[in-house]
Image (cartoon, helix red, strand yellow):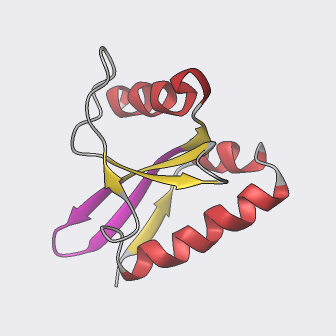
Amino acid sequence: MYKVQISPEVEQDLVELPDAVLKEVFEYFGLFELDPIKHSGKLHNQGQLKLEGYRKTYVAKATYRIVIKIEDGVAKIVEVVAVGKRDNKEVYIAAHERINKQ
């Protein structure tokens, strides 16, 4: 069993989502607790956006993404990095900025 961690930045992402998308995102958070690898795909670097080692899940007919990092140490954690629209790589840019701020 994994624990899903949500930062204040991700909380703000969630507030901005339409209700139907938010509902689907929370359904995925529940699935991540059971098996995050099964419910996500590998992310690769995209030009200047260094995202290798992170994973993505398509939401709302692939118009939104959830970007996560899985930590399989002693405590099994799924860190939600960003949730948002894929348009113009918006969610990937936010994820990249948050990753590099840490």
Q: Nearer the viewer, residue 92 or 63?
A: 63
Give left or right: position of 2 versus 16. left
59 to the left or right of 1: right
Q: Is residue 76 magenta?
A: yes
**Quadrant placement of the N terminus:** bottom left
Across and down, in percent, residue 31 comes to 48, 77
Compared to residue 5, the image places residue 64 above or below, namely above
**On the rendered structure, is 40 left or right of 28?**
left
Say which residue appears at 61% left-offset and 27% top-offset: 87
Please tell me which residue is depicted at 40% across the width and 68% down the height of the picture: 39
**Total label count?**
0
Whole-percent x, y for residue 86 in the image: 57, 34
Residue 57 at x, y percent in the picture: 46, 55
| Identity of the residue furthest to the top in this view | 48
In which quadrant is the C terminus drawn?
A: top left
Image location of residue 13, percent across then percent down: 66, 43
Position of residue 73 in the picture relative to residue 6 (left or right): left
Measured along the vertical axis of the image, is residue 80 above or below residue 53? below
Residue most extreme to the right: 19
Stretch in magenta: 69-82
Q: Does the magenta stretch include residue 73?
A: yes
Q: Is the magenta stretch mostly helix, strand or loop?
A: strand
Q: Which residue lies furthest to the front in this view?
A: 61
* 78 over 54 or under it: above or below: below
The residue at 36%/33% (across/down) is: 99
Give the image quarter of residue 12.
Answer: top right
